[in-house]
Amino acid sequence: QAQLVESGGGLVQAGGSLRLSCAASRSIFTMGWYRQVPGRQRELVATIGFDGSTNYAKSVKGRFTISRDNAKNSVYLQMDSLKPEDTAVYYCHAAQGPVVYWGQGTRVTVSS
């Protein structure tokens, strides 16, 4: 079992920046972020492996940067050049083999 605790969401104007943080209760191989808008499926934002390998959704590539601190069992999402379409609830995600964990979600609102 593992718990994920997120922080860092909020309201920001278009073009601004936010940094999301997620702390896990133990070391987990793959960590990342997904987001969801009401009425739509949860979608991948970015993931990062224990070795630092990354994967980004096309819509955020070049604007968002995912990183992790393995010593702190934590993952971060630096979001720059935010757009109104980035508005969503962002969920921390972690996976160890077939087992998947989710955080409670943190809301990001980007005003135009």
Image (tube, rainbow, N blue to C red):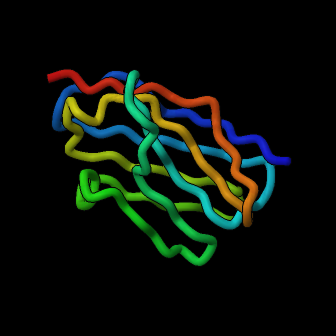
Q: Nearer the viewer, residue 42 or 91?
A: 42
Residue 91 x %, y %: 53, 38
Q: Nearer the viewer, residue 32 or 67?
A: 32
Residue pushed farthest right? 1
User: Which residue sits at x=23%, y=33%?
Assistant: 85
Q: Nearer the viewer, residue 88 or 78?
A: 88
Residue 70 x %, y %: 67, 65
Q: Is residue 34 above or below residue 27?
A: above
> Is 18 situated left or right of 111 in this image?
right
User: Which residue sits at x=45%, y=25%?
Assistant: 107
Q: Is residue 58 above or below residue 81?
A: below
The image quadrant of residue 63 is bottom left
Residue 73 x %, y %: 70, 57
Q: Is residue 86 above or below residue 45?
A: above
The image quadrant of residue 72 is bottom right
Residue 61 x %, y %: 27, 59
User: Which residue sits at x=60%, y=57%?
Assistant: 31
> Is 65 situated left or right of 25 in this image?
left
Image quarter where the C terminus lies is top left
